[in-house]
Image (cartoon, rainbow, N blue to C red):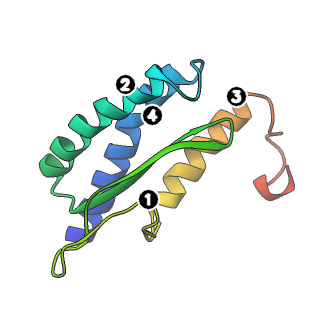
Amino acid sequence: MRSLALRGSSVTLLLTFTSSVRTIRSQPTTGPCVESFAQHLDSFVPKRMQELHLPGAGLALIDHGEVIWTKGYGVEDKTTGKPVTPETVFQAASISKSVTAWGSCDWFKMGSCRSMLPLKDT
């Protein structure tokens, strides 16, 4: 039951950032805008992780397919205290279904996907 709660919390955390990331999309991929948003994440993420009882999270800002910022928060293993880094690999588990559905909807809205074909054929 706890793992289901954590997965749900991960989705909440992901969706919380979605609207904020979209607001900087039209801005330059470096400079004050990205730095300012990264500072916002540095104050927001640890608080939100504590509220959701998440031990660790890894975040990346991606602009037009290019990773422009990464950071790890918290720990990947509570017993060893090993910190999360941008290189930490997380198991996607059930969250991949939500992320795929969300991305597919965006892709469809942009006209890049034809609704009658399976995604693998588009």
Query: Depth check: 1 or 77 in front?
Result: 77
- Of the two numbered discs 4 and 1 on the same chain, state the one appearing first in sequence: 4
On screen, residue 72 versus residue 82, left or right, reads right
Q: Kindly check if marks 4 and 1 are in contact, taking CB atoms under 8 A apart as contact.
A: no
Crowding at label 4, few (<14), some or many (≥20) Cα neighbours within 10 Å?
Answer: few
- Quarter of the image where one finds residue 91: bottom left
Residue for badge 1: 86
Crowding at label 3, few (<14), some or many (≥20) Cα neighbours within 10 Å?
Answer: few
Residue for badge 3: 109
- Of the two numbered discs 2 and 3 on the same chain, state the one appearing first in sequence: 2
Q: Name the amino acid, label 3.
A: Lys
Name the quadrant of the N terminus.
Answer: bottom left
Residue located farthest toward the bottom when viewing the structure as drawn: 79
User: Vertical placement of 121 versus 68: above or below?
Assistant: below
**Image point (59%, 22%), residue name:** 28
Q: Which mark is residue 36?
A: 2
Residue 1 visible in the snapshot: no
**Image point (60%, 18%), residue name:** 26
**Image point (37%, 34%), residue name:** 38
Residue for badge 4: 18
